[in-house]
Image (cartoon, coloured by chain):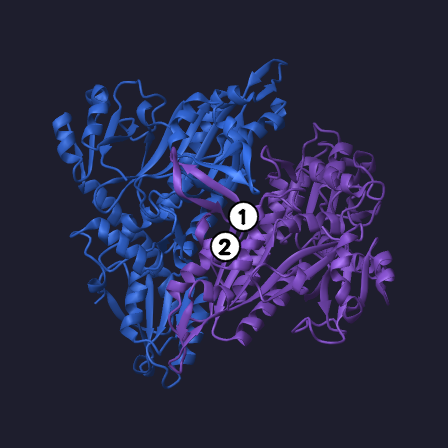
Chain colours: A purple, B blue
């Protein structure tokens, strides 16, 4: 039934994506090119992402703070590679308070420059290190080809910024965030398997010594960079004079990291799990894990549905009661499918008379069961766990079956049209720039065993090549 | 001991305020005039405010969403009074992506215009109403006389925006937010008594029919507007064409509200409760309710302090362990006093040998007690409740003793130099503009019984006049 309301995924993937965004009421385009309005359901998903990420970030020892939106233009220029990378995307305030400003201010595209200007004040001694700061904020990058959630002029994100006494400490922390926060969140909350690796020199962040990444495969076989963690070396510490007195009394520049994920993750959710009926939200992420849908309010069904919802809430399920019986049942069922609520419980007078309800799982099309009211709480909890596992496995299977081991450049080009091509880095190292002509990029480098390489120069590394968002 | 580190309140209140902000590590000034960096401890307080407000806002039925930072300049002009009120404070982006923009975009000073342009799309039928939306966001108003937390070029806030079918529904909702969210939060979480009333026509929000307010008295007798809730009438509905089909089939313009509180509340916390030793944070708000301070790590005191902290955390207390024994004990005690942590528990080897710890309450200067380890959890919980009540009572007593019933304009002028002057509105109604010459304003109008008036035109109203931040 729901299939009619969306363009099919296989027919036109980009159109299907837009349809899901609109019909699941996730977002609208804003009036200024490339901006978006995140609607309540889309924002509820983002709030769940924030809560899960925030907990992991705090476990990694970082504290939240907030730095200004406006950065003096001169700050950007202090790190040469950084300003070169971001200049084409900047939005600039030239007038304020009815006057032209003496120095234009930039709307932050990322906050390395302004945050490190304060680190310079706060870091004096080795006892001030490590300094571990995270910020939840909006940032602006003027996009030529915007696409809602994936590439927007303004987006919401978290950006972590840290300073350490040694290069080794900074590296360990950048990788800790990559694995314990980002990979863990993608796998256990979003139910998305990710490649964890290192970016090539060509693809690393402007101003970093090394960029680490998690890369997901979307429903059309393309890659999506879902999060990055950078080793900044001493580049910003030198530009902003972040020095400390070491325990032996010498003055040293700090070693730094930065790392971030954004509302782009909502795009990953849509394209990683969505199907022809709409979104499919993994239970661990879902703002609504189960919806109790009242079919008709007759013979006490309304009261029973409400008490059932309360009972599930009491058992720790994030539940919503849909008792809008003025709206047709079919229309409401389609709405909850579009929104990807993992479990739907349909409560009608006929079922109730028999002591049962209808249980519908969203992840497997058409799977319905008539089940006893008795013990429903435990059954729903079990089903949610099963759906979480099943969505992960489905995404993993798709990635595995769409990944090809390629021996040379031609095989890479062919395989990367529809999925991931794995190829020895040594084979394509010199051809990386050529791949760009085919809109292909090296998504990441890994060790043969899947580990994250300490450098892109070593032998035996595997490159994964794909089209990407 | 702590007194030496701050300017005294009575000596120089503005300097004392700045000292507390700096030494409690709440915030720093940003490089662009009027902007601020909210440091981790200041931000932790804001996060607690957000959590408590968010819960109350959701209980009032509103859903969170996010709208763009950038608003086309033309949107601002659609509501005549609104653009007139905000024009002098706007920051304008004229260049982006390396080019001059065809239409400059404004950095939101508030979001009525952009949000209502979407309400116009989303509201079609009476069944779409009420539409209740809240947003947590940063906003920008170019300030000529910035002061950290109180009046900053960029600040963080929540802004609620709603649409209703009738004027009565909108009024009820505006007042519900005022009482059940703002007044409740100020009283029960911030431990600050507030006057709840109506703004005069002169003081209402640009574009509103009525503005309701909560007003607190600060430590120097001045007023601080802590939150406002507006009835927008049909002003924005007409400007943005928000219409709906009523149940009887007619087409009507919606009736609207908007309402907000901001990081200014951190300023209210400082000036409402702070003393010569620093901040005093009410336990219901405090990110750290109790700190366990290890005096010296000898004779197992370190382990005992850690287990005590774990025990308190298990009992639901937000607790921090301070085991930085490399830093002098006195210095650490001063730090926790500056930060206003309600309860300090000092754990040293000598005490422990006797089965005791030293319990220090922050709200009453110099109050220390040697108490048994046995039953400490319950004792701390009781003490936190007592401190919450006591801080509220102290603030209420100060307000009462600094409020004068005035009969005429001269008495008002005198009393309002050091506190609040209450005066019949009929007596000063014609002189409201004259008061401005003395930097005095009518903070709010109330019924004789303290109720919120339905209009400023009625007889028997009481005006409260004060200096204000």
Q: Position of residue A108 (x, y in %)?
A: 50, 49
Query: Can the viewer see residue B226?
Result: yes
Q: In the figure, residue B469 lies in which quadrant?
A: top left
Q: Position of residue A375 (x, y in %)?
A: 73, 53
- What residue lies at 29% left-to-right and 26% top-to-bottom? B447
Work out whether residue A428 or residue B421 is closer to the camera in this orientation and state it: A428
Query: Residue A139 has which mark?
Result: 1
Q: Earlier in the sequence, mark 1 or mark 2?
A: 2
Direction from residue B405 to residue B141 in the image, left or right = right
Q: Does residue B268 lie above or below B335 as drawn?
A: above
Name the subunit of mark 1.
Answer: A
Q: Residue at x 71, y 32 (%)?
A: A297
Badge 2 density bin: few <14, some 14–19, many ≥20, Cα 10 Å:
many
Badge 1 marks a residue whose secondary structure is strand
Question: Label 1, label 2: how many angstroms apart (C-alpha)?
Answer: 9 Å
Q: Nearer the viewer, residue A461 or B386?
A: A461
Tell me the residue at 50%/75% (across/down): A166
Tag 1–tag 2 contact (CB < 8 Å): yes
Residue position for label 2: A111
Describe residue B45's horizontal placement relative to residue B93 as left or right.
Answer: left
Residue B380, picture quadrant:
bottom left
Q: Give the farthest residue toward the bottom.
A: B299
The label shown at residue A274 is none
Near-viewer residue (B382 or B128): B128
Residue plotted at (26% across, 23% down): B461
């Amino acid at each position: 039934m729901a299939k009619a309301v969306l363009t099919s995924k296989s027919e036109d993937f980009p159109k299907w994506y837009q349809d899901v965004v609109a019909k699941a009421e996730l977002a609208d385009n804003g009036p200024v090119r490339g901006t978006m309005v995140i609607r309540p359901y889309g924002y509820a998903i983002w709030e769940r992402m924030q809560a899960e990420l925030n907990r992991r970030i705090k476990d990694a020892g970082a504290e939240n703070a907030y730095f200004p939106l406006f950065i003096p233009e001169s700050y950007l220029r202090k790190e040469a590679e950084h300003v070169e990378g971001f200049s084409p995307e900047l939005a600039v305030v030239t007038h304020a308070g009815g006057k032209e400003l003496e120095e234009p201010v930039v709307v932050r595209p990322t906050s390395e420059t302004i945050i490190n200007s304060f680190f310079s004040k706060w870091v004096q001694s080795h006892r001030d290190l490590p300094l571990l700061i995270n910020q939840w904020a909006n940032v602006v990058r003027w996009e030529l080809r915007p696409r809602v959630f994936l590439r927007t002029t303004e987006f919401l994100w978290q950006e972590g910024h840290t300073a350490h006494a040694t290069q080794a400490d900074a590296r360990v922390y950048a990788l800790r965030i990559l694995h314990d926060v980002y990979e863990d969140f993608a796998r256990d909350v979003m139910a998305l398997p990710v490649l964890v690796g290192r970016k090539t020199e060509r693809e690393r962040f402007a101003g970093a010594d090394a960029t680490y990444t998690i890369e997901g495969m979307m429903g059309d076989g393309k890659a999506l960079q879902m999060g990055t963690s950078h080793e900044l070396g001493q580049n910003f510490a030198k530009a902003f004079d972040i020095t400390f007195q070491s325990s032996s009394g010498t003055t040293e520049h700090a070693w730094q990291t930065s790392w971030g994920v954004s509302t782009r993750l909502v795009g990953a959710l849509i394209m990683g799990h969505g199907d022809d009926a709409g979104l499919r939200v993994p239970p661990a992420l879902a703002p609504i894990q189960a919806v109790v849908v009242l079919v008709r309010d007759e013979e006490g069904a309304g009261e029973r549905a409400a008490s059932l919802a309360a009972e599930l809430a009491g058992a720790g399920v994030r539940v919503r009661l849909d008792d809008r019986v003025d709206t047709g049942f079919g229309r409401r069922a389609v709405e909850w499918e579009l929104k990807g609520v993992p479990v739907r419980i349909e409560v009608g007078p006929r079922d109730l008379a028999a002591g049962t309800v209808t249980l519908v799982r969203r992840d497997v099309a058409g799977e319905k069961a008539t089940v006893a009211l008795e013990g429903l709480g435990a059954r729903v909890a079990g089903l949610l766990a099963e759906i979480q596992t099943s969505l992960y496995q489905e995404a993993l299977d798709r990635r595995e079956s769409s990944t090809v081991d390629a021996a040379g450049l031609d095989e890479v080009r062919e395989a990367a049209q529809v999925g991931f091509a794995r190829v020895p880095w040594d084979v394509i190292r010199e051809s990386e720039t050529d791949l760009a002509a085919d809109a292909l990029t090296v998504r990441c480098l890994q060790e043969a065993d899947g580990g994250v390489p300490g450098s892109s120069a070593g032998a035996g590394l595997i490159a994964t090549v794909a089209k990407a968002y």
